[in-house]
């Protein structure tokens, strides 16, 4: 047993012995343990209002015995009953987290959605009639645009707390790197103007895309492509971590 | 997670803690 005098080898061998113990000794008693849990399930489900339709299978996704039951047959039940059934099954001693067969873990924590808020429509309605204009090859706004920005700032006010993206566009005259620099400079100028009108800085993002996305149906060389667009993105809700809590669905 | 895997994780944790304690008591002197 000379190799045992080398610590890394001995430690790795110990870990392997533990793997074998867990896989075969604990694995051998696992079906009986899972069967004992699943024998208690029907009575508990009946009591919670599952009406004998819901069944709890104590198997892992790969079909091995597990402490985390998969609940099937709950489709016709309403959310409250499902939540109660899930909670009742989770309360069986030894049971881990609950999964429903007709849902996934993502449904439990909520989808990530980027929902435009109504003030985006307000701003777009303002910008449909008039546009924020700049002096040629410059990020200086003309006087008429400053008035328009007052209105835009007022329209954005209900969405404070949301993320507001300011995108600058140019037409395709001149080299593209210069256009991108100019468009982001213009977006930053609009941002600075909005800051002066009391919109907080932490929600404002700027981006310059040059002439990459012209107005639909418009020639890329058309000067009307020089524009500023606003998109209002809803703030993301905080996602709860899917841990061992009974899922309502 | 299958039961054997949960048992494995717990035993490995205990093994690691045991190694750490054993090392701190006897490992330094030799």
Image (tube, coloured by chain):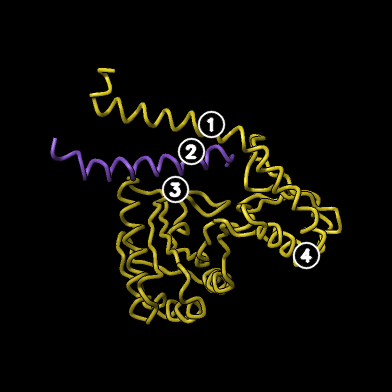
Chain colours: A yellow, B purple
- Label 1 or label 4, whichever lies nearer to me, is 1
Q: Dot 2 surroundings within 10 Å: few (below 14), some, or many (20 or more)? A: many
Chain to which mark 3 belongs: A
Residue A23's mark?
A: 1
Q: Earlier in the sequence, mark 1 or mark 4?
A: 1
Choose between A217 and A198: the one closer to the eye.
A198
Residue picked out by circle 3: A212
Distance from Cα at disc 3 to Cα at disc 2 = 55 Å
Q: Is residue A56 left or right of residue B25?
A: right
Question: What whole-number distance in Å separates the C-alpha atoms at marks 1 and 3?
Answer: 57 Å
Q: Image quadrant of residue A169?
A: bottom left
Q: Is residue B25 above or below residue A7?
A: below
The chain carrying label 4 is: A
Q: Which mark is residue B8?
A: 2
Please tell me if label 3 and label 2 are on a single chain: no
- For label 4, the crowd category at 10 Å Cα-Cα, with few meaning under 14, some 14 to 19 and many 20 or more, is some
């Amino acid at each position: 047993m000379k190799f045992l005098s080398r610590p890394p080898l001995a430690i790795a061998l110990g870990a392997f012995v533990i793997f074998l113990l867990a896989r075969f000794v604990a694995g051998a008693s696992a079906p009986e343990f899972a069967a004992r849990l699943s024998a208690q399930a029907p009575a508990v489900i009946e009591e919670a209002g599952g009406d004998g339709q819901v069944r709890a299978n104590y198997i892992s996704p790969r079909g091995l015995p597990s402490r985390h039951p998969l609940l099937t047959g709950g489709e016709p039940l309403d959310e409250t009953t499902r939540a109660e059934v899930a909670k009742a099954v989770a309360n069986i001693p030894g049971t881990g987290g609950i999964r429903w067969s007709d849902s996934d873990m993502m449904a439990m924590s909520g989808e990530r959605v980027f929902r435009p808020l109504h003030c985006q429509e307000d701003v777009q309605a303002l910008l449909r009639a008039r546009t924020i204009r700049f002096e040629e090859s410059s990020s200086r706004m003309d006087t008429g645009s400053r008035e328009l920005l007052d209105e835009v700032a007022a329209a954005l006010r209900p969405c404070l707390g949301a993320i507001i993206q300011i995108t600058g566009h140019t037409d395709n005259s001149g080299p593209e790197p210069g256009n991108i620099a100019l468009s982001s400079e213009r977006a930053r100028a609009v941002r600075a103007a909005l800051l002066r009108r009391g919109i907080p800085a932490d929600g404002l993002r700027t981006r310059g895309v040059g002439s990459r996305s012209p107005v639909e149906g418009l020639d890329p060389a058309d000067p009307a492509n020089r524009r500023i667009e606003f998109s209002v993105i809803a703030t993301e809700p905080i996602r709860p971590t899917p841990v061992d809590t009974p899922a309502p669905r | 997670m299958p039961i054997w895997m949960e048992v494995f994780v717990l035993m490995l944790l205990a093994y690691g803690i045991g190694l750490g304690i054993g090392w701190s008591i006897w490992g330094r002197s030799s």
